[in-house]
Amino acid sequence: MSAKPARFASVDALRGLTVAAMLLVNNPGDWGHVYAPLLHADWHGCTPTDLVFPFFLFVVGVSIALGVVPRAEAGADRGALLRAVAVRAVRILGMGLLLHLLAWWWLDLAHYRPWGVLQRIGLCFLAAGAVALWLRPRVQWLLLGVLLLGWWALLAWGGSYAPWENLASRIDDALLGPWLYAHDPASGRGHDPEGLASTLGALATTLLGLRAGDWLRRGRTRALWLSGAVALLGGWLWSAWLPWNKNLWTSSYVLWTGGWALWALAAAHALVDVRGWPALGRSFGVNAIAAYAGSAVMVYAFAGLGWWEPLYQTLFAGWMTPRFGPYLPSLAFALAFVGVWWLVVLWMDRRGWHLKI
């Protein structure tokens, strides 16, 4: 068997910057005063914030191509590799369930929510890992095409892309009903932005990252740039019939966000791996799950103990709002939150502490 697969600093940096962006958009000081680019689109559309989760799932696919596939090609038992992928996927999913349990208990929420970001990452990691190990590249491309066209066909067959009425919402509501992210008791309808049905679109994003990681590994960086342009153009044209929509993870949204992710990966590789620029964000990248989960626990603790609002008012809003208005202190709080966690992961990285699950 060959040596341990090579690690690309550019991928760690891109993963880390994505996690930092997650923390930034998830933790403003005041949700009533957030600059528009740092908010998700209300329904249809794509803001810079709507790029964050697709970027992370894209990098999940890239990481599988760089970490799992070389071991299989070197002769490792594919069954054993799949079991290792499955164990890690279950751990990621389990951590997501545990975090939501903590939020439900600590924040005294009305109900427990099974779906979430880590749960979706775990499912996509498991499915993409199996695809990488057992399907040839041409079949992987074929599967990606089937997912894009099939998910479009299913949503169209459902008869509506509107909130609550679309097929994804109806499927998720039939499965879990009142336990979803949003539920309307009067109508009995619900919706979850990380529900099971729309994970089909999220898996397509992960498979696109899988193929991009193979190009990166083989030095085919021109393919990253060209395919990024094709994906952006395709996603833009497709949006005339199938709107970009993160909640539904529509196929046009897969291509549009995937195009930007392909270009981001190509640019990170050119700047970090080739030109030797500092791998900005690397510390977040090598402790991505630890940073995401740890910051979530911190938020639940501060909110549950009643510290969040006084902290924000004392350190930021109280003196900044009269001078600069309400939006800047809200952003400053979010930046400070990211800064605190940057110091935490930097400290961990310098001690060689890379927590994996």
Image: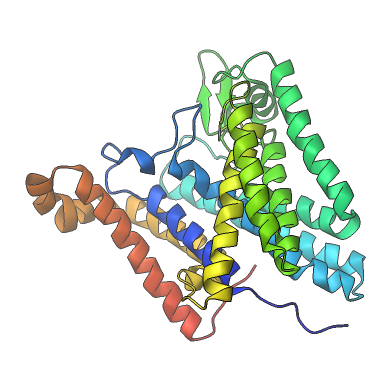
- Residue positioned 56% across, 68% down in the render: 270
Residue 79 place in picture, x, y as percent = 91, 65
- Residue positioned 9% across, 53% down in the render: 319
Residue 83 place in picture, x, y as percent = 84, 64
Along the line of sight, the residue nearer the viewer: 5 or 342: 5
Q: Is residue 291 above or below residue 310?
A: below
Q: Quadrant of the C terminus?
A: bottom right
Q: Is residue 103 left or right of residue 357?
A: left
Q: Is residue 6 above or below residue 88?
A: below
Residue 54 place in picture, x, y as percent = 58, 47
Q: Quadrant of the N terminus?
A: bottom right
Q: Is residue 46 left or right of residue 211?
A: left
Query: Residue 249, can we see it?
Result: no
Residue 147 place in picture, x, y as percent = 77, 36
**Residue furthest left in the image:** 322
Along the line of sight, the residue nearer the viewer: 117 or 324: 324
Query: Residue 208, can we see it?
Result: yes
Along the line of sight, the residue nearer the viewer: 108 or 327: 327
Q: Is residue 73 above or below residue 221?
A: below
Colouring style: rainbow
Along the line of sight, the residue nearer the viewer: 273 or 39: 273
- Number of residue marks: 0
- Residue positioned 27% across, 36% down in the render: 32
Q: Is residue 351 left or right of residue 54?
A: left
- Residue positioned 70% across, 29% down in the render: 175
